[in-house]
Image (cartoon, rainbow, N blue to C red):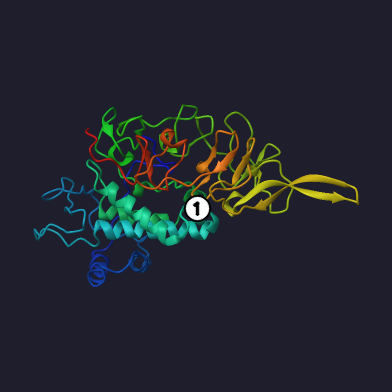
């Protein structure tokens, strides 16, 4: 099992809002449950602008889906499709799980488009596809056994996504509210990070992984999800802290943040389009720029290759995408689909669709995000048969 590259955090934050706000938003949602996620998200934003930090929780206790009665921490249960238990012991649910997932997906895709139109096109093609796929992944996660996703955690998650930095959005380092602590302890079987109380399900070669503790600085990792908060799994498979503006870079474990470049041994803003470069890592990747050599004439007799940062057109299958260690073209569906073929040339391949072969079974081909390559097949959401 290979998890996606977007990070997972472990704790659920909760806040308390006035009951009047609960009733106001509940009444609004009652008349528009079938509207699209954007409309619901707008209403959420309006409701959260009264100085109460956008909270919509009257009960701060963590609520676990599927309970038949009162939650042990004082909440009330809801079903995955949003139906609240009609036991007259609490106010009706504000939103369904589906509405919460739609809000979460809408907020993330909106921020991604604001931060990098290029990354939106690179990963999803268009915003509607982004919303559809992230909402579907969210629903699959919420319906998995032993997770603590509730309508409240989803609403809070949507609110906090709106305040994330562009680096966090592009890396998908989600707020803690988006990843409530699971119920399975270390060593138990899992198919999702959200099933584990550690917040990390270590991948394996079959469909089910194991809940494991997250790694600290310098420890081995397979992806960002394996590392403690604030750390990144680098290309050498070690959890490291990414350098900020002006900090040292270029060493064994010294990498810069997503929107920075390592220039002259220091993390700095990337080289602008037209500037001289040596690798694509020095260019503005969020804008889709790559470092490529072009020929420039000197006088009438001499032509010299000059490497400059230039905009990349998303490569169709078959496009040459890498020369040595330097990425020369981004591939539609993500740069993980820049694959070394039998002739030794790196070319773009079409990403694997849900249900298609991926990974070693498909010459390293990656899935359409946010699907995961699970036992050689692309799956959107966890495999729910994994036993604790």
Residue at 34% across / 47% down in the picture? Answer: 380
Q: Nearer the viewer, residue 153 or 282?
A: 282
In this view, the residue farthest toward the right is 300
Residue 18 in the image, given as x and y percentages of width and height? 27, 63
In this view, the residue farthest toward the left is 87
- Quarter holding residue 7: top left
Does residue 18 lie above or below 372 as drawn? below
- Quarter holding residue 221: top left
Residue at 27% across / 55% down in the picture? Answer: 152
Residue 243 in the image, given as x and y percentages of width and height? 58, 39
Does residue 18 lie above or below 332 as drawn? below
| Whether residue 364 can be seen here | yes
| Whether residue 162 can be seen here | no
In this view, the residue farthest toward the front is 343
Residue 176 in the image, given as x and y percentages of width and height? 37, 46
Does residue 49 lie above or below 316 as drawn? below
Q: Nearer the viewer, residue 32 or 91?
A: 32
The residue under label 1 is 165
């Amino acid at each position: 099992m290979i998890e996606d590259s977007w990070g997972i955090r472990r704790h659920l934050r909760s806040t308390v809002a006035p009951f009047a706000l609960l009733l106001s938003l509940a009444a609004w949602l009652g008349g528009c449950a079938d509207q699209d996620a954007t409309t619901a998200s707008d209403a959420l934003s309006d409701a959260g602008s009264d100085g109460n930090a956008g909270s919509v929780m009257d009960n701060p206790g963590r609520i676990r889906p599927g309970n038949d009665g009162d939650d042990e921490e004082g909440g009330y249960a809801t079903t995955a499709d949003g139906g609240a238990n009609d036991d007259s012991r609490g106010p009706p649910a504000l939103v369904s799980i589906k509405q919460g997932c739609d809000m979460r997906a809408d907020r993330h895709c909106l921020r991604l488009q604001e931060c990098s139109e290029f990354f939106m096109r690179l990963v999803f093609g268009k915003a509607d596809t982004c919303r559809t796929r992230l909402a579907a992944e969210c629903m699959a996660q919420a319906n998995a056994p032993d997770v603590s996703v509730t309508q409240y955690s989803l609403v809070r998650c949507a609110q906090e996504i709106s305040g994330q930095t562009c680096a966090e959005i592009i890396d998908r380092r989600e707020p803690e509210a988006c990843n409530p602590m699971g119920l399975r302890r270390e060593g138990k079987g899992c198919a999702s990070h959200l099933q584990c109380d550690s917040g990390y399900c270590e991948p394996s070669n079959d469909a089910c992984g194991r809940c494991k503790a997250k790694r600290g600085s310098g420890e081995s990792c397979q992806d960002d999800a394996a590392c403690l908060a604030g750390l990144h799994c680098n290309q050498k498979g070690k959890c490291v802290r990414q350098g900020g503006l002006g900090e040292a870079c270029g060493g064994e474990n010294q990498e810069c943040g997503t929107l920075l470049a390592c220039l002259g041994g220091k993390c700095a803003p990337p080289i602008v389009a037209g500037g001289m470069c040596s690798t694509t890592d020095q260019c503005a990747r969020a804008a889709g720029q790559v470092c490529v050599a072009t020929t420039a004439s000197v006088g009438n007799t001499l032509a010299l290759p000059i490497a400059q940062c230039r905009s990349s057109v998303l490569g169709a299958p078959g496009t040459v995408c890498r020369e040595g260690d330097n990425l020369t073209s981004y591939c539609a569906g993500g740069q993980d689909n820049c694959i070394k073929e039998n002739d030794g040339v790196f070319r773009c391949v079409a990403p694997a669709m849900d249900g298609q072969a991926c990974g070693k079974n498909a010459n390293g081909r990656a899935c359409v995000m946010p699907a995961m390559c699970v036992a050689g097949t692309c799956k959107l959401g966890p495999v729910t048969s994994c036993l604790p």
